[in-house]
Image (cartoon, rainbow, N blue to C red):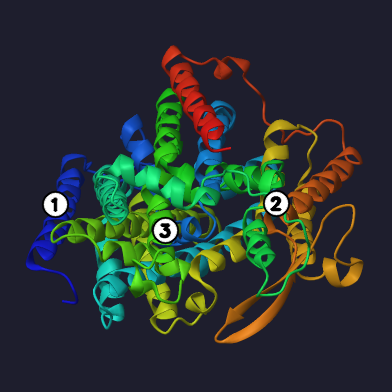
Amino acid sequence: MGSLTTADLLVFFIYFAFVSTYGYWIYNKKRKDTVDTKDFFLAEGSLTWWAIGASLIASNISAEQFIGMSGEGFFAGIAVSAYEWIAAVALIIIAVWFMPVYLKNKIFTMPQFLKTRYNESVALIMAIFWLFLYVFVNLTSILYLGAVAIDGLLGGGYLHIIMIILMLFALIITLGGMKVIGYTDVIQVAVLIVGGVATTYLALTIVSDKFGSGGSAIAGFNDLIKQAPDHFHMIIPKPDVTSATIDQPANLAIQKYIVLPGIAMYFAGQWIVNLNYWGCNQYITQRALGADLDTARKGILFAGLIKIIMPFIVMLPGIAAYVLYKNGHLPQLASGSKDGAYSAILGFLPSGLKGLSIAALTAAIVASLAGKANSISTIFTLDIYKKYMSRDASEKKLVWTGRLTIIAAMIIALIFTWKDTLGIGGEGGFTFIQKYTGFISPGVFAMFILGMFWKRTTGAAALTGVILGFVLAVFFNNYAVSIFGRETLLYTAYEYQKTEAGVIKTITEIPFLINMGWSFFFTVLAMVLISLAGPKINPKAFVSDPSLLKLKPQIIAMIVATLMILAALYVRFW
């Protein structure tokens, strides 16, 4: 099968058998005589803090991280680590301030939060929207990108078979409920980290060997810094010019700044991306909603500590590929395609380790598929089916409805990815996901953050906010330049050229993360003005409990450790 040896296949099948067997054992060990919705969807009281943390990471890391972030490491360098390291800080904020609000008000789903805080209309609109987003964007992209990545490693020709295998593997785990997902995610994360570290270690030793510096991983890391010093700065400098053609050095600098706009992205964009993703996302917060506050906080902070090391697993191989390619040691990456960087590095791995790396990639994909499918099932069953289709449904019927929803969602995703109906491959999977989720992040995050921490926020303001946030995101990304020009007080648009399908195209755009910041600012402003025009006392406002903000010594120690490590990393690579 492609370039895989018997040892590679053996390692992979051991992984597959172990995860499946362990999941079945967990299912039987923790099975109740009567399975209710809280047990199936939330694993209420069953997940330990380390299981919650591992499950958060397993749900977050998938093919778009391994392939996409490695590709951005190849293209822009360590600056892309901001997505991971700001996430670690965002998780601290969520553990300390967001979780008390959710758990005190017994929130199990994000639409339930919106119904409790605002009204039924806001909750229903967002429930339907999230279902479409999760099924047609997230689930399809995870399945497609994962299958394409593994197919490439196998030599090609197995795409549809791999899609079916990934779907069935995810179904085995997901149909057992959140308990099975949570505890098998611990194994998935272990495989993901071990396989990822092995790949990074081998990549660094290969670099060291090629440059004759001793063949060690540390020497290889130092070689990367020497060979590509511009790839080891967290802040990408603002280009000296706002326009460049494809034959000018500034053209590449502009493209990097468009993706990661220097210090500017830290003022709003990165925070909106991470706080919305980790704090207002059913797919993620569901892991912690069934636990007590102390367990939930420890699990979330544990995930934050793991996020710190993720760039070294998923990004560093991309920089290694860049250095090898630049010096003519990676001929299989002849086109210099950044999305092929991770697969090209895997081609160097010895027999057995390649199988481990594929197992790590599969673990990331399957865990993400399982987590996303469970969230789809939870929202449909509890926020739509139970409320609008069968109000008197028994717990048993609701659980089976959830299982059937999982199967239906997986089949729909498979149909839409079979021939890449949505065009995921046409514009790149990482871009596809960012494009269709980033447009709503400003409005959704504004609705949640004001709803949690400002008592006067009204339902009318929330509904206006989610619509206005989307409209503003579309405006800044597609129409602002043509209406107001390339330079205003709010933004600077950059013009550059790139080759697509052999044709040179001129593109003018504003950095996406800056667009997101302005969309959020004006959305919050509109929501505040609408709310101030409403009643001064809002009966829907959450009652705060200052006692829940008290932190235990273990929690404080985890927060301090996270911040100290991040501070050291930023000082080193600023």
Task: Please state which amino acid type lies under the numbered disc 2.
Answer: Pro
The image shows residue 565 at horizontal and vertical percentages of 47, 28
Where 363 falls versus 213 (above or below)? below
Q: CA distance from mark 1 to mark 2?
A: 41 Å
Residue sitting at 8 percent across and 62 percent down?
7
**Which amino acid type is marked by label 3?**
Val
CA distance separating discs 3 and 2: 37 Å
- Mark sitting earlier along the chain (1/2): 1
Q: Which residue is mark 2?
A: 442
Considering the image in quadrants, where does the C terminus appear?
top right
Asked where in the image residue 167 lies, by quadrant, the reply is bottom left
Q: Residue at x 49, y 59 (%)?
A: 380
Spot the residue most to the top: 553
Q: Is residue 53 left or right of residue 254?
A: left
**Does residue 387 sit above or below 101 in this rendering?**
below
Give the residue at mark 1: 18
Q: Amino acid at mark 1?
A: Phe
Find residue 300 and report its image quarter: top left
Task: Measure how far apart labels 1 and 3 are at the Cα level.
Answer: 37 Å
Mark 1: few/some/many CA within 10 Å (<14, 14-19, 20+)? some
**Disc marking residue 491:** none
Q: Going by the image, does 231 lie left or right of 4?
A: right
Residue at x-position 45% and y-position 44%: 286
- Residue on which the image places disc 3: 323
Comparing 140 with 354, the one in front is: 354
Q: Position of residue 40 (x, y in %)?
A: 34, 47
Which tag, 1 or 3, sits closer to the chain's start? Answer: 1
Most foreground residue, 163 or 128: 163
Q: Is residue 541 visible?
A: yes
Q: Nearer the viewer, residue 99 or 241?
A: 241
